[in-house]
Amino acid sequence: MSLRDEALHYHRKHTGKLGMVAKVELKDGYDLSLAYTPGVAEPCMEIHRDKDLSFKYTCRGNMVAVITDGTRVLGLGDIGPEAAIPVMEGKAVLYKTFGDVDAIPISLDTKDAGEFIKAVRMLQPNFAGINLEDISSPKCYDIEDALKAQMDIPVFHDDQHGTAIIAVAATIGGLRLVKKRIAEVKIVVNGAGAAGTAIVQLLLYAGAKHVTMMNSKGAMYEGMEMSRINRVQAALLSRTNLEKKQGGLAEIAERADVLIGVSQPGAFTTEIVKSMNADSIVFSLCNPDPEINYNDAKAIGVRVAGTGRSDSPNQVNNVSVFPGLFRGAIDVAARQINEEMKLAAVYAISGIITNEELREDYVVPNVFDKRVAPAVAAAVARAAIKTGVARTIIDPEEVKINSISRINIA
């Protein structure tokens, strides 16, 4: 049976990948009186007096919505909200398995940003966090910014920030191995969409000083024709490509130390990669076909290579990010996910691998490493408390211990 046939049979057999399981049993009338009438009135009135108690008395406290409009699904493009459900459903399974976070897939039948924003905002009383997913760029920026401003729970576009967190964590791991400093190396990010701009922003926040962002036309620089850039890209140009170099990837990647791709399959040619500095680091994150595959990159002489795929070493995948990130955020009932929390996740992931364990094919932890989600959860909770966005103050080590007991990785 082919993978296609097996995947279709798998989804059809189970009628999708999610179901509803009650946390409590109803064995008799007394159980019913606690779960429903008359006992249910008591938490209702407590929440009426203080709506934040909904995080403690209801499923909201462990519930995240995975929401899309189906306009940019995986590498499939604008396939519509119904066709996007299997991906949102799969994301919910990952949340539960890796972080014991309950997640509900929601596909909204609108391409209008205003309608999307209004619908998500009205869902706020049900959830501890919102994971935006597979929304086309640049609309995704406006949606996330508006929802973050209007909502009192974390709103996180994973295609942007989850990818950025794991890409920067992998970069830090690679730089540790080759003994280079992030503030000194030349970094090129090929691709200036949602993921590319978020990677650049987080690299800068992590201390990178020499970053150049590429779009399909070439190197981006401050003062370039404004019709070719969006507001998010424009905001980054005063801090990137400070020499205002122009040209294509072949010119810009020459003597680079780090090359990160979120662009097109095959974009990193042999000539481009060979022109980089010694001890080069190349992460090709285009899925399912990378800018250059792992074996080819290593054969050319790349010191540290990685892709988004699970069939080669150094998988750079946001599965290592969002379960632990939201576990930590909702354990302290955070009001947002800020830059400090994102950077805390970066260092939690990169810190999993000790200097003794670090090697060319192991600069980023495996997605099935049971240490990752608890470490990320504790670091994110600590950062949320420190920056004042947590409603609940608890010991981050308690978050870590609880996370270890809750994850369901075989």
Image (cartoon, grey):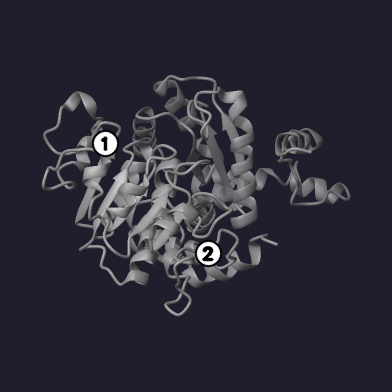
Left or right side of 2 for 91: left
Q: Looking at the image, is 110 positioned above or below residue 91?
A: above
Q: Splitting the image into 4 quarters, where does residue 366 fall? A: bottom right
Furthest residue in direction bottom, as rendered: 356
| Residue topped by disc 1 | 232
Residue identified by numbered label 2: 372
Q: CA distance from mark 1 to mark 2?
A: 30 Å
Image quadrant for the N terminus? top right
Point 32% across, 65% down: residue? 279
Q: Specify few, some or many for label 2: CA neighbours under 10 Å numbering under 14, 14-19, or 20 or more.
A: many
User: Going from the N terminus, do you reach mark 1 or mark 2 first?
Assistant: 1
Location of the C terminus by quadrant is bottom right
**338 horizontally vs 159: left or right:** left
- Give the crowd class for mark 1: few <14, some 14-19, many >=20 residues within 10 Å: some
Q: Of the residues shown, which amino acid type is indicated by label 1?
A: Val
Residue 157 location in percent, x, y?
Answer: 43, 41
Instruction: Locate residue 236 relative to residue 394 in the image: left or right.
Output: left
Secondary element at image label 1: helix
- Relative height, residue 31 to residue 77 (above, below): below
Where's residue 110, x and y in %? 50, 19
Question: Residue 44, can we see it?
Answer: no
Residue at the spot 37% in from the left edge and 35% down from the top edge: 150
Identity of the amino acid at label 2? Val
Please identify the residue farthest to the right as the structure is shown. 28
Question: Residue drawn at (65%, 54%), measured in percent from left and top?
Answer: 97
Q: Image height check: is 282 above or below 128? A: below
Residue 25 is left or right of residue 261, and the answer is right
